[in-house]
Amino acid sequence: MGDAGREPSDRDRHDDPAKPGGRIWLVKWLLIAAIAAIVVAALLIFDGGRV
């Protein structure tokens, strides 16, 4: 049990960005969602407008 209290420090650093509560995680998914929305909108506009 004693060792478990010392190691988490390294794991916490790696888990922080990946946790749903982290700002990096939120920003990352917001960027992915924004890019996906732009791509979908562009495809719809080019497919429906040009053709």
Image (cartoon, rainbow, N blue to C red):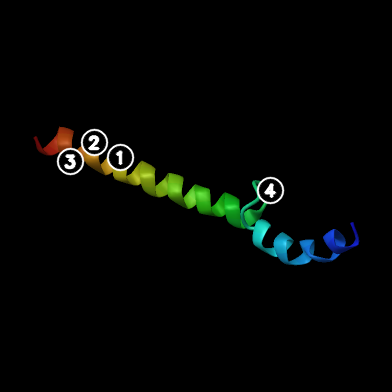
Q: CA distance from mark 1 to mark 3?
A: 10 Å
Crowding around mark 1 (Cα neighbors within 10 Å: few <14, some 14 to 19, many 20+) is few
Of 30 and 1, which appears nearest the observer? 1
Nearest-to-viewer mark from 1 and 3 = 1
20 horizontally vs 34: left or right: right
The amino acid type, in three-letter code, at marker 1 is Val
Nearest-to-viewer mark from 4 and 2 = 4
Q: Earlier in the sequence, mark 3 or mark 4?
A: 4
Q: CA distance from mark 4 to mark 2?
A: 33 Å
The amino acid type, in three-letter code, at marker 3 is Phe
The amino acid type, in three-letter code, at marker 4 is Gly
Q: Which disc is residue 40 wearing?
A: 1
* Circles 2, 1 touching at the beta carbon (< 8 Å): yes
Nearest-to-viewer mark from 1 and 4 = 4
Q: Residue at x 30, y 40 (%)?
A: 40
Q: Residue at x 52, y 54 (%)?
A: 28
The amino acid type, in three-letter code, at marker 2 is Leu
Q: CA distance from mark 2 to mark 3?
A: 6 Å
Query: Measured from the top left, where is residue 1 in percent x and y?
Result: 89, 56
Q: Which disc is residue 44 wearing?
A: 2
**Is 8 located above or below residue 46 in the figure?**
below
Query: Measured from the top left, where is residue 35 in percent x and y?
Result: 38, 49
Q: CA distance from mark 2 to mark 1?
A: 6 Å
Q: Earlier in the sequence, mark 4 or mark 2?
A: 4
The local secondary structure at tag 4 comes to loop
* Circles 2, 3 touching at the beta carbon (< 8 Å): yes
Q: Which residue is mark 4?
A: 21
Query: Measured from the top left, where is residue 49 in percent x and y?
Result: 15, 36
